Amino acid sequence: MGNQEELSLDLEKLEKARNRFISEIAKNIHLYNITSSIGRLYGTVFFSEEPMNLDDMSEALGMSKTSMSTGIRALSNADMVERVWEKGVRKDLYKTEKDWYKSFSNVFINRWRNATELNMGAIKETKEMMTELYKETEAEEIKRKVDRDLDKLTEAEAYYEWLNEVIALFETGEIFEIVPKKSAQNNKHSS
Amino acid sequence: MGNQEELSLDLEKLEKARNRFISEIAKNIHLYNITSSIGRLYGTVFFSEEPMNLDDMSEALGMSKTSMSTGIRALSNADMVERVWEKGVRKDLYKTEKDWYKSFSNVFINRWRNATELNMGAIKETKEMMTELYKETEAEEIKRKVDRDLDKLTEAEAYYEWLNEVIALFETGEIFEIVPKKSAQNNKHSS
DNA sequence: AAGTTCGTACAGAAAAAACTGTACAGACGT
DNA sequence: ACGTCTGTACAGTTTTTTCTGTACGAACTT
């Protein structure tokens, strides 16, 4: 068999192996609020030896350049991909963010921090409305209902305070003292 | 003003206040992989003084009973709602799960545990395929590429091991030693 | 056994999201 | 200044998800 043929056969095998992992990423990336197709994009950039531009991506995935543009922005917002600069290259180049811990933390923080803040705000407002009502009303029935509701809201509030502190664990990096980063031991092709 | 009129006016105010919080829940519940409408369902059950059946829910939200059925199942699977039994009542009754900490943990664990497991499996397989290829191939170029890929995969693996341990924190409840549950202080209508 | 009541499977309708092609603004090279 | 290249806004199309109405099986009542 000619060397050239063999090479392209091996390249195909490599592609297949890469694809195994890319497909799995695509399947699970919805956890980061990212579409499966854009998950494939992530995987493709992940394995790429060079940073990729939008046209590369478009060709590699057989999708429109527009989709690549919006997709890469989504990945960028989630800190999963970053833009790199290369001398003399006009096109935007992207590579995957190497620090997966950071990517996870960022996504985790952004998603939950935002929600807890909004929810706590809503609880506060709701409580105010209810307290107001409690003062105004004459009806015992209303007072009783408001009382119960306020208790429920207070419980919810306690939970959100806890969640906020959990989030802070990741924000401050304290989590890495509790669960230290794993160092990747060297890989040596041993069977 | 008649007492009756005033009562219904106050009830309306109560409804409005409740709605403020319900709407916020609906807006953020997608974090638990639950639809905004079903988020409203959750909020409605949350404030309800009695456990609700499917017909109650359907009427309260103006949605079909079918949707209530599938919606409550989604909430139930996420451990956000639980079925309660009442003597002599044939319809299924539901109330919200009071332990929000548990609900959060369950969702967190289920979502990420599953993904990490699958991803780690995929990494293992991909590595095997690549190691095989490394042994077979003659081409230096392929060997070089495989080498780089294996390093990348090993890094990813380390990350997933870390994530697994983080998940375990919630699974074992150890997280509550690190960030203790907040006790809801009593609420006393004080301005 | 016959008649109700209840929950849900399933198919189709309605709504939302993902994706594409066109078009255009801004940056660059000449 | 003019033409070219690059990224993205936007409108329209395709795909996916959510929601509804019908229909039916299981459990209960009489």
Image: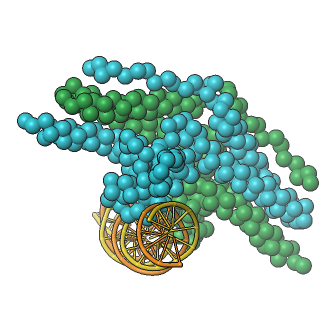
Chain colours: A green, B cyan, C orange, D yellow
Q: Position of residue A74 (x, y in %)?
A: 49, 53
Give me the residue at 79% from left, 54% from top.
B124
B133 or B178, nearer to the observer:
B178
Residue at (88, 65) in percent of width and height: B137
Residue B188 at least partly seen: yes
In the image, residue B176 lies at what x, y percent? 61, 28
- Residue at position x 13%, y 41% in the image: B5
**Quarter of the view holding residue A101:** top right
Residue at (62% x, 60% y) in the render: A27
Tell me, yes or no, if residue A78 can be seen here.
Answer: no
Please identify the quarter of the rendering in which residue A61 is found: bottom right
Image height of C27 relative to B179, above or below:
below
Q: Pick the quarter of the image with the C terminus of chain B.
A: top left
In terms of depth relative to the viewer, which is nearer, B53 or A151? B53
Q: Can you tell which quarter of the image residue B142 is in?
A: bottom right
Total marks placed: 0
Depth order, front residue of B50/A48: B50
Expressed as whole percent of the image width and height from the top left, the position of residue A138 reads: 18, 28
